[in-house]
Amino acid sequence: MKLLAIAGLFLSFQVQAYLLPCQLVTQMAGSEVYEAKLQRVASMTAPEDLPAAMGLELLERHGGWYIYQTPEPWFERRTCGPQLRTVQGKNLQFMPVLLNKKTGRNAVLTGTFLLKTYRAKHLDEVIERYGFRLVTRLPKPDTVIIDVKPIQSYDDMIEMLDKDRDVELVAPLMSEPRYQLR
C-alpha cells in the first residue's frame, strides 16, 4: 500500500511538471542552464514603434531582437509559442524568452528546432507529417534544422513528438548572445 502511494505521488508529480508554461521547451533546452521567463518577450519591433499602452519595458537588445519585460505573464501552458498582438491596427509578433542562468542573458525561442530521427529515411516523413519547414540538413543524415512556425505551443509540439516512434530528439535552437564585450 505504501509503495502504491509513493508511485502515485511520483506519477502525479510528472504530470504536474508538464502543466507549467514553457516547461517542456525549457527542459529540452537544458533546465540546468535555462529558466522560462514568462514575463519576458522578444520582438524585432523597436521600442519607439511600440504603443506605450502595451506597458513593455526594454531590458536588452541583441542582434535584431529587443527583449521586453511585460506587466504580467503572456504565456500559459498551451500558448508557449509565437504570439501575434494587434495594437492600434499594427500586427506585432512576440517570441518567448528563456534566461540563461549561467550568463544572465536572455535567449529567444525563434521557432527553429533540431530534429533527429532514429533512421534517416524517416526525416522527410516526419517533416511532412507535422507540416514543418526544412531549414537545413546537417552532416549526420538523420538530423536537420526545422522551422515549426506558425505554432501555438512549443510544449504541445514537444509532447507530440515525444510520442512519435520515429523521433529521437527535438531541441530548440535559440538566438542568444554568446560573448559580452568589456
Image (cartoon, rainbow, N blue to C red):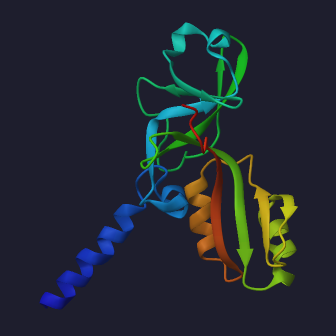
Relative horizontal placement of residue 142, taking residue 69 as reference (left or right): right
Q: For the point 82% across and 80% down, which residue is it?
A: 122
In this rendering, the answer to whether 97 lies above or below 32 is above
Q: Quadrant of the C terminus?
A: top right
Relative horizontal placement of residue 13, taking residue 144 as reference (left or right): left
x, y (%) of residue 135?
A: 85, 56
Residue lying at the far left in this picture: please name it. 2
Q: In which quarter of the image is residue 3?
A: bottom left
Q: How many labels does the image show?
A: 0
x, y (%) of residue 8?
A: 25, 79
x, y (%) of residue 160?
A: 61, 68
x, y (%) of residue 126?
A: 79, 72
In this rendering, the answer to whether 10 lies above or below 174 is below
In this rendering, the answer to whether 25 lies above or below 46 is below
Q: For the point 69% across and 32% down, which residue is it?
A: 63
Nearer to me, 132 or 65: 65
Q: For the point 80% across and 78% down, which residue is it?
A: 142
In this rendering, the answer to whether 68 lies above or below 119 is above
Nearer to me, 106 or 25: 106
Nearer to me, 125 or 177: 177
Q: In which quarter of the image is the N terminus?
A: bottom left
